[in-house]
Image: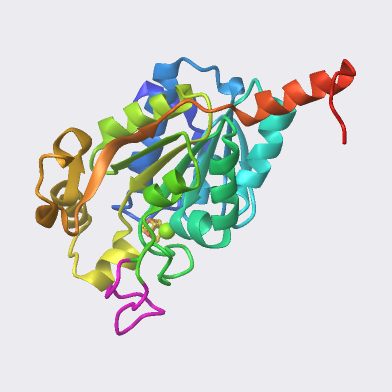
Amino acid sequence: MGAIHEKYLRMDKLPHIWCPGCGNGIIMSSFIRAIEKLGYEKDEVAAVSGIGCSGRITGYMDFNTLHTTHGRALVFATGIKMANPGLKVFVFMGDGDAAAIGGNHLIHSCRRNIDITAIIFNNHIYGMTGGQFSPTTFRNKYATTAPYGTTDPDFDLVNLCIGAGASYVARSTSYHAKMLTDLFVAGALHKGFAVIEVITHCPVNFGRRNEFDTPADMLRWQKDHAVRTAKADMVPMEEMEGKFVIGELIKKEKPEYVEEYDRLIETVRKGDAHRE
Ligand code: SF4
Ligand code: MG
């Protein structure tokens, strides 16, 4: 572990509880590098997480941290940002957390465009609770709740967030760790709601049931199925079947929620507001 990690981690909370070979440590490491690049002071950063293996990240990092309830991390984060807009607010969620119980909060955060960076650890399974299938588990994959394979189609989180109005949406994988750092930096600098989906690996509760012998096999799968945005347009549609695009997928300017809200308060204070 390098000095950069010692600077940002709560060393007294280690060792972590993540299984050997899990992708979560790669994502945390990429995030720490992003904060170092951004040059944020530790006290300027608020890190909020939900429930699940990914949710444990806020226990290990030495920022203002909040480990909240299942699916509600964005709600706590919204309150933090509204109360203290100067904070750089980051939210960490798993796929079940973000797209199932917290799906409602995710789409409305996208619609509002509040200046928060949401990082979704998508390992296509409920890891911590023992391997139940989640909204992002691919069809015909095995889970403790789908011993004969799933029949549900999976959610495409990127398209969901773009459709809900997010002004910044990107995707990468735990294999593409350097790109992850770059996207975390770009998401943090973007004014508005930024979603970064990380396709990651749970070797214990997804991999073992779905014919991945080792964590390295899962990383190889990510490498072989990810297509960078610059290349995606050149790849014939039939070759994109089963693959996914990584990089920045949408980036646009929209009014930011806290600024709009503050503007309204100021207008009312001055007595200029129109009321029916
Ligand atoms: Fe990682 Fe899966 Fe273990 Fe959770 S259960 S720590 S996601 S490998
Ligand atoms: Mg998960």
For this rendering, which residue is in front, 8 or 81?
A: 81
Q: Which residue shows up at 84% across the image and 24% down it?
A: 273
Q: State yes or no: residue 142 in magenta.
A: yes
Q: Quadrant of the N terminus?
A: top left
Taking the image as shown, residue 137 lies to the left or right of residue 208, namely right
Vertical placement of 190 versus 247: above or below?
above
- Please say whether residue 244 is one of the residues in the magenta stretch: no
Q: How is the image coloured?
A: rainbow
Which residue is nearer to you in this view: 251 or 182?
251
Q: Is residue 220 above or below residue 143?
A: above
Q: Residue 172: x percent and y percent? A: 30, 41
Choose between 240 and 40: the one closer to the eye. 240
Left/right placement of residue 20 relative to residue 238 reads: right
What quarter of the picture does the C terminus occupy? top right
Magenta: predominant secondary structure element?
loop
Residue drawn at x 57%, y 30% is: 115
Residue lying at the far front of the rendered structure:
276
Q: Position of residue 207 (x, y in %)?
A: 26, 64
Drawn side of residue 266 relative to residue 100, left or right = right
**Residue 54 visible in the shown view:** yes
Picture coordinates of residue 203, whole percent (x, y): 29, 60
Q: Residue furthest bottom?
A: 148
Point 44% across, 18% down: residue: 38
- Where is ligand 1, by quadrant? bottom left
* Quarter of image, res 113: top right
For this rendering, which residue is in front, 129 or 230? Answer: 230
Query: Which residues make up the magenta segment?
Result: 138-152
In percent of width and height, residue 225 lies at 17, 51
Q: Is residue 5 visible?
A: no
Vertical position of residue 231 compared to residue 133: above or below: above
Q: How many marks?
A: 0
Residue visible at 71% across and 25% down?
84
